[in-house]
Image (cartoon, grey):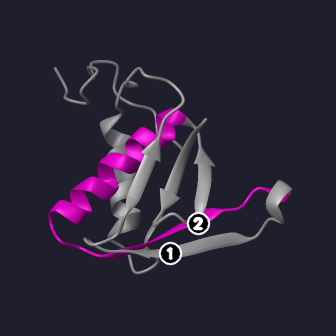
Amino acid sequence: MGTFIYEGGPKTEIEDRALAHVQLVISAKLRRGEPFAFTWAEDMSVGGGRTTMWVHPGSSLVFKFRSNRQPEINRAWVDALAFTANAPSGLYLVPEPTSAPSEGANGATA
């Protein structure tokens, strides 16, 4: 289980594989200078509910992974997450879609 930390304040635990995909989407948006909202559901252990934060190119973000191995990237999941990030509601974690069997570790099709 990895951790996403925003400006030393709000943070949430996200499974390493999902966090790697979220990191790719957030990094791409910020490289293009595109601010957006990021929303996640809070665990009941911290009271439940949800948190939304505004992410912009000047944001201080930390992606802390439990594992030191880079997971295989599912390009379809990156695309699905990017779709939410480009919507007015902003980025939120969606379930991983099934990827094509010919997809490699870098998400490219053969």
How far is mark 2 from mark 1, CA to CA?
Answer: 8 Å
**Of the image marks 2 and 1, the number of the one nearer the N terminus:** 2
Q: Which residue is mark 2?
A: 10
Q: Which residue is mark 1?
A: 53
Q: Left or right? Give the position of 107 relative to 63.
A: left
Q: Residue at x 49, y 35 (%)?
A: 65
Q: Inspect the magenta stretch and tell me whether residue 35 lies in it.
A: yes
User: Where in the figure is residue 3, as x and y percent of width and height?
Assistant: 55, 46
Q: Left or right? Give the position of 50 relative to 18.
A: right
Residue 39, numbered circle: none
Mark 2, Cα crowd under 10 Å, few <14 / some 14-19 / many 20+, is few
Q: Residue at x 49, y 41 (%)?
A: 18
Are the residues tagged 2 and 1 within 8 Å (C-beta)? yes
* Circle 1: residue type: Met
* Circle 2: residue type: Pro
User: Where in the figure is residue 68, as x and y percent of width and height?
Assistant: 43, 22
Residues in magenta, as a range: 16-44
Quadrant where the C terminus sits is top left
Residue with the most extreme front position = 8
Q: Is residue 108 above or below residue 22?
A: above
| Secondary structure beneath label 1 | strand
**Residue nearest the observer in this picture, 42 or 105:** 42
